[in-house]
Image (spheres, rainbow, N blue to C red):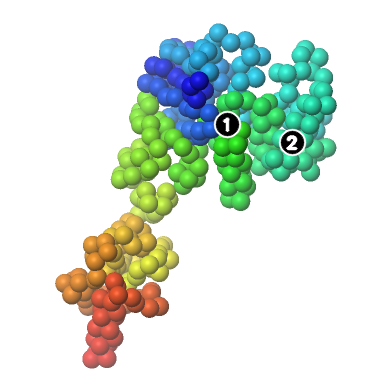
Amino acid sequence: MSSVILSSEELSVGYGKKVVVSGLAFEISRGEILTIIGPNGAGKSTILKSIAAQLPVISGRVSIAGNDITEMSPNDLAQKLSVCLTERITAEKMTCEDVVSTGRYPYTGRLGILSSGDKDIVREAMELTGVSYLADTDIRCISDGQRQTIMLARAIAQQPEVLILDEPTSFLDINNKLRLLSILRELARNRNIAVVQTLHELDLAQRFSDKILCIKDNKADRLGTPEEIFSGDYISELYSIANGSFLSEFGTAEALKVTGEPQVFVIGGGGSGIDTYRRLQRQGIPFAAGVIHENDLDYPVARSLAAELVTEKAFEPVSEESVQRALAIMKKCDEVICCPDSFGTMNAGNKRLFEAYKSLIKSK
């Protein structure tokens, strides 16, 4: 039996006859998390709505367990697939438990009467998402973040094979973002649910996804693992980043570097210089940095923010040549900041550099 639960073939989606995204072809297996990323307005939400049969596809095919979604009844589809979108729900006189309970309607028949088993599933979904304490609270009286989690509980109570979420971390603080994504990871791993989501937080997409689908210029631009997508300059190209830089090593962005003749020389290494690089950038002070190994924790940030950078090859001791290049730049600076508290064998050259600076100060 194939583990593929959701697939698309030559899929084009949009509104009416207007194509928003074309060239969609992917397969998602049970237990996998697929995250869709791309610039604002790229059509990510349109893709989700089309996969969920909330929008008719323009061309191509979406299948769940080999069945074309257009040939499935709404009730059959609801038992296979649940959706958690960002639209604000409008519910009059409904408690949070009432809202979560609607996730059981595909199984209750026309009267919508929940069995004791249904009620157990609802309580379990609320416990899993940590919102049991809201059970008797009016849905209109909770925060946006709490509402987002209630809607996730509702989707989980539906017991789907495929769970679709549009920006599920919106409105959540960082702790609850991590908690929600950890819940999704657990659902995928332990309950064999396939998860399809959109995220704007690229660092979280990098850490919590099995596959990433990139959308750009009205088409599916690239599909791959996080390791394949977050490499080189691809993310900068995907988002046409012009107001800073993206560090694929960390999955984070940096502001524009301050250019010009360096006023400060920063001796860093081992991550010790990162805060200083960012502080100088915020203050609008052009700076030089060195000597930084190309595999050092400091290197991606220094590469992005330093006006000049002296580097050394990975796993090689800092050479005398690198020390002299750094010293030549340092002599032109008004200030030197040494960030490391100690020096080891590989960066002993930086100790010589700092000692050379102190000798220069004494000689003045």
Whichever of labels 1 and 2 marks the residue nearer the N terminus, that label is 2
Q: Is residue 254 left or right of residue 104?
A: left
Figure quadrant of residue 78: top right
Q: Position of residue 104 (x, y in %)?
A: 73, 23
Q: Looking at the image, how many numbered discs can be counted on the residues?
A: 2
Q: Residue 360, which numbered label? A: none
Figure quadrant of residue 91: top right
Q: Is residue 49 left or right of residue 99?
A: left
**Amino acid tagged 1:** Asn
Q: Position of residue 5 (x, y in %)?
A: 52, 23
Q: Position of residue 92 (x, y in %)?
A: 79, 27
**Amino acid tagged 2:** Glu
Rate crowding at label 1 as few (under 14), some (14 to 19) or many (20 or more) other CA atoms within 10 Å: some
Contact? badges 1 and 2 (CB < 8 Å): no
Q: Indicate the quadrant containing the C terminus: top left, top right, bottom left or bottom right.
A: bottom left
The extreme front residue here reads 1
Q: Nearer the viewer, residue 138 or 70?
A: 70
Identify whether 195 is placed above or below 129. above
Q: Nearer the viewer, residue 218 or 325?
A: 325
Q: Which residue is mark 1?
A: 192
The extreme bottom residue here reads 363
Rate crowding at label 2 as few (under 14), some (14 to 19) or many (20 or more) other CA atoms within 10 Å: some
Q: Which residue is mark 2?
A: 124
Identify whether 321 is placed above or below 284. below
Q: Nearer the viewer, residue 188 or 108?
A: 188
- Residue 168 visible? The answer is no
Q: Position of residue 363 (x, y in %)?
A: 23, 91
Distance of mark 1 from mark 2, alpha carbons? 17 Å
Question: Looking at the image, which residue is at 81% across and 14% down?
Answer: 111
Question: Looking at the image, which residue is at 38% across and 43% down?
Answer: 227
Question: Looking at the image, which residue is at 39% across and 54% down?
Answer: 254
